[in-house]
């Protein structure tokens, strides 16, 4: 993960206190890691996919810095929220694309159209999102582990730290979550 321990946390606190220079320090410190997370989300997409990791990072970052009143717990918490936001962005775009393909309402081209997922992947993104939402209803921690390990690419130690659980507990829940999702998506 990017940045020295505590450095990202301190910058987040500075930003929350209204230090506008903190935003520039934050993006320079976390950009590489955010781009890696975005690339992981998009790795299964078609090579000519219109949404690139850079565009996803920019959209997520704009939303992240707009969040007020967050009690940031540190670097892992920041990247976990970032990964969740990226997932939400992709799902929202997939839903809007699916809706547009069904002919719902008048369709106007807007700036966000430049970052729509490829049409053939939209159903898979929606199916995964729906499965993760069902898992979250059953076991929110397991759903969060999937986001942190699979989408954010966190190690067992990083994800365990972010969730406040031991690596052993995380490994057990990770195995159960993967099996549950496989069953949901393939049966």
Image: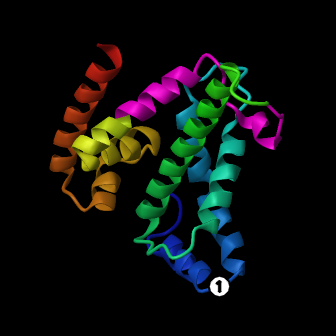
Quarter of the C terminus within the rendering: top left
Rendered location of residue 71, percent (x, y)? 44, 75
Whole-percent x and y of residue 24?
A: 71, 70
Say left or right for 10 vs 53: left
What residue occupies the far top of the structure in this picture?
187
Q: Quadrant of residue 73?
A: bottom left
The structure residue drawn at horizontal position 31% and vertical position 36%, both measured from the top left corner, is 134
Label total for image: 1
What residue does disc 1 label? 18
Q: Splitting the image into 4 quarters, where does residue 176 fall?
A: top left
**First to last magenta residue range:** 107-131
- x, y percentage for residue 118? 66, 23
Instruction: Name the chief secondary structure element in magenta.
Output: helix
In the depicted view, which residue is nearer to us: 82 or 97? Answer: 97
The 10 Å Cα crowd at callout 1, few under 14, some 14 to 19, many 20 or more, is: few
The image's colouring method is: rainbow
Q: Nearer the viewer, residue 143 or 77?
A: 143
Q: Is residue 54 magenta?
A: no
Residue at the (36%, 36%) spot, across then down: 132
Against 183, residue 69 (above or below) is below
Q: Residue at x 65, y 85 (%)?
A: 18
Nearer to the camera, 14 or 104: 104
Secondary structure under tag 1 reads: loop
Residue 72's place in the image compared with 79, above or below, is below
> In the image, is 61 to the left or to the right of 81?
right
In this view, 19 is above or below 86? below
Question: x%, y% of residue 182?
Answer: 30, 22
Residue toward you, 174 or 121: 121
């Amino acid at each position: 993960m990017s940045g020295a321990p505590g450095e990202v946390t301190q910058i987040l606190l500075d930003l929350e206190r209204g230090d506008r220079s903190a935003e520039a320090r934050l993006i320079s410190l976390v950009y590489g890691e955010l781009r890696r997370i975005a690339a992981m989300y998009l790795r299964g997409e078609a090579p000519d996919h219109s949404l690139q990791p850079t565009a996803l990072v920019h959209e997520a970052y704009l939303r992240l810095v707009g969040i007020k009143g967050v009690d940031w717990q540190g670097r892992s918490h920041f990247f976990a929220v970032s990964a969740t936001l990226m997932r939400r962005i992709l799902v929202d775009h997939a839903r809007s694309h699916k809706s547009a393909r069904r002919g719902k309402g008048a369709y106007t081209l807007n700036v966000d159209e430049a970052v729509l997922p490829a049409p053939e992947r939209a159903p898979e993104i929606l199916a995964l999102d729906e499965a993760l939402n069902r898992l979250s209803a059953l076991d929110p921690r397991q759903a969060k582990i999937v986001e942190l390990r699979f989408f954010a690419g966190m190690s067992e130690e990083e994800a365990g730290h972010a969730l406040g659980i031991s690596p052993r507990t995380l490994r057990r829940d990770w195995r159960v979550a993967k099996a549950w999702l496989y069953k949901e998506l393939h049966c």
